[in-house]
Amino acid sequence: MAVSIRQDRITGVLAPVLTPFDRTLAPDPKRFVAFCRVLRQLDIGLAPFGTTSEGNSLDGGEKLELLDALAADGTDMARVMPGTGTCSIVETARLSAHATRLGCGGVLMLPPFYYKGVSDDGLFRAFSEVIQRVGSRSLRVYLYHFPRQSQTPIPLALIERLLKEYPGTVAGIKDSSGEFANMQAMLKAFPGFDVFTGTEALMLPVLQAGGAGCISANANVNGAAMVELFRRWRAPEAAELQEALTAFRVAIQDFPLIAALKALVARASGDQNWRATRPPLLDLSLDAEDQLIKRLEKAGFPV
Amino acid sequence: MAVSIRQDRITGVLAPVLTPFDRTLAPDPKRFVAFCRVLRQLDIGLAPFGTTSEGNSLDGGEKLELLDALAADGTDMARVMPGTGTCSIVETARLSAHATRLGCGGVLMLPPFYYKGVSDDGLFRAFSEVIQRVGSRSLRVYLYHFPRQSQTPIPLALIERLLKEYPGTVAGIKDSSGEFANMQAMLKAFPGFDVFTGTEALMLPVLQAGGAGCISANANVNGAAMVELFRRWRAPEAAELQEALTAFRVAIQDFPLIAALKALVARASGDQNWRATRPPLLDLSLDAEDQLIKRLEKAGFPV
């Protein structure tokens, strides 16, 4: 099984689930749940409200509604790791508590990201406040390290303090820095700390170094191939599987990623409403979509 | 009058009002309203939920509650310009609509700031969606240009498009870039567009260039002196008044600004609870407070 509990923890491949909007740009719980079902059938775990999900473009109520819809659909919530990190510790705690009550296997927590250049002490205080406000032994926090987007990196010294203060609760990290050396350093320094690579281009080396899996945007459309690598990363064909994942990523990476992924889902599902993004993003132009399709076909991924 | 309506617009000195927290780090509407009264008695306008207010560290409900408390206190809401810009256009529209219904003279709107490197088209779409959702002729939008903090600058080309599409609604800007050339360029390019400097160190030159006023953190503790300059900027003593404003700013600028301002308000009011900041910020250490006091005294500002 691609997403499995190892020592009561999520591992494997998770998709930061794309958020479907209706014509008024409101999130559509029905299409969201239907899309999540497809992902789950492929053994892909669910990380809604991530960067790719336009999570921070949703308000708190919208996130609660989508999460409730997922639970109401009978989803195995142990395979769900929603993004809960916002600029406000109060809102982050509220979302994290709700997710924990619903039985989510973990929450993916951005640090508060409005103020730049904040101290490690300040970030420690932020995560501490949230953990204490949730106040549940069932809470599993996965830190979200995405320096380019949040401009608020999570250094190893901070992780060390958090692990010491909240063992069992601080469970792992999604590292979207793209820096293998950072993932390697965390795996070496913190045994039992689950490191997920944010790019599937590093999936094999991260698994070989003891990583827990991969949470990547492209899992929304190319997740089955990632699951395949997760299942067979010790097999001789692993290098070839990795090569194919990287080729897909290279083919799509020159396009605005979220809009491109939504266009691909629209194409695959025949539902053009899937193309819609919320501002400040823009929907993929039809020209760019044509180019994307050609690029993917050329790279060996007929769409 | 320092804060006056010029052509139905706010001008003068506004304070990004510090937010008082209680021991549980919840905002305290009573102390907030009391502090706002003090500012208003000094003829200082109110810009709550700005960067200095830890506005983005509050959740939407907390902001609505504080704004309602201000209205319930009989505040002249035409002198209030709350910060309403968040990462979510839905939440930004909700706060902006509420502020407009309460009669606020304007709203100070950060662009959505999670995604970095977004296009001007995307930002135009974001502001457009919010303006259309509010759908009120009473809405006055002041753009909030703070590249260092939001990492999402508001270029002149975008302002030009917005002014063309939403004349009367897009009313001005708070420019916290600290770049006089940018403020000058806007004043030259957009007659009738109200430019507020985000630093009082540029207040006199900005007023001389036709600017509308100043919205600065230090107005929370040194606002009376700013009001004095606003009243007398054409008088011979204006340069001297400007010099004193700049000296105060220089004396405080090496300290973590929000925590330092809160410590000063705590000292002035005798209410030590004022020292509290929300994570990821840290309260000012007592050592740093001692240094701050000495520094201010040395600069000619006995505390």
Image: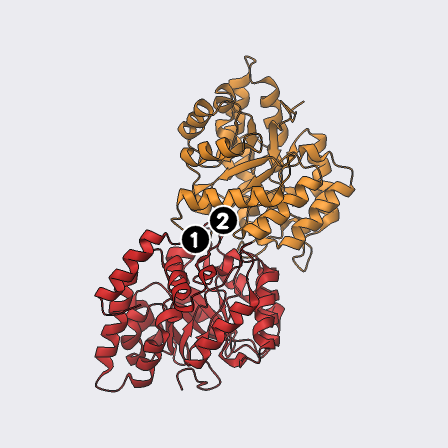
Chain colours: A orange, B red
Give the image quarter of residue B197: bottom left
Q: Where is residue A43 in the image (x, y as percent from the top left)?
A: 68, 28
Q: Residue A103 carries which label?
A: none
Element assignment for label 2 = loop
Q: Which chain carries label 2?
A: A
| Image: B149 above or below A167 | below
Which residue is at 67% across, 45% downward?
A98
**Which amino acid, mark 1?**
Tyr
Seen from the viewer's position, the closer of residues A192 and A218 is: A192
Q: How crowded is mark 2: few (under 14 residues within 10 Å), some or many (20 or more)?
A: many
Q: Is residue A173 left or right of residue B288?
A: right
User: Which residue shows up at 28% across the image and 80% down it?
Assistant: B208
- Of all chains, the one bearing label 1 is A
Q: Which mark is residue A112?
A: 2
- Distance between the Cα atoms at labels 2 and 1? 8 Å
At a point 42% along the width and 66% down the height, the residue shown is B270
Of B15 and A268, nearer the camera is: B15
Instruction: Please give the label number shown on residue A115.
Output: 1
Residue B20 on image: x %, y %: 49, 63
In which quadrant of the rendered image does the C terminus of chain A lie?
top right
Give above or below for B36 relative to A216.
Answer: below
Q: Is mark 1 on a helix, strand or loop?
A: loop
The location of residue A142, given as percent across then percent down, is 55, 36
Left or right: where B35 falls relative to A270? left
Q: Are marks 2 and 1 in contact (CB under 8 Å)?
A: yes
Q: What type is the residue that disc 2 sits on?
A: Pro
The lab-note entry on whether marks 2 and 1 share a chain reads yes
* Looking at the image, residue B139 lies above or below residue B110: below
Please state which of residues A207 and A253 is positioned toward the viewer in this rendering: A207
Q: In which quarter of the image is residue B217?
A: bottom left
Q: Where is residue A247 in the image (x, y as percent from the top left)?
A: 50, 30
Q: Can residue A138 be seen in this view?
A: yes
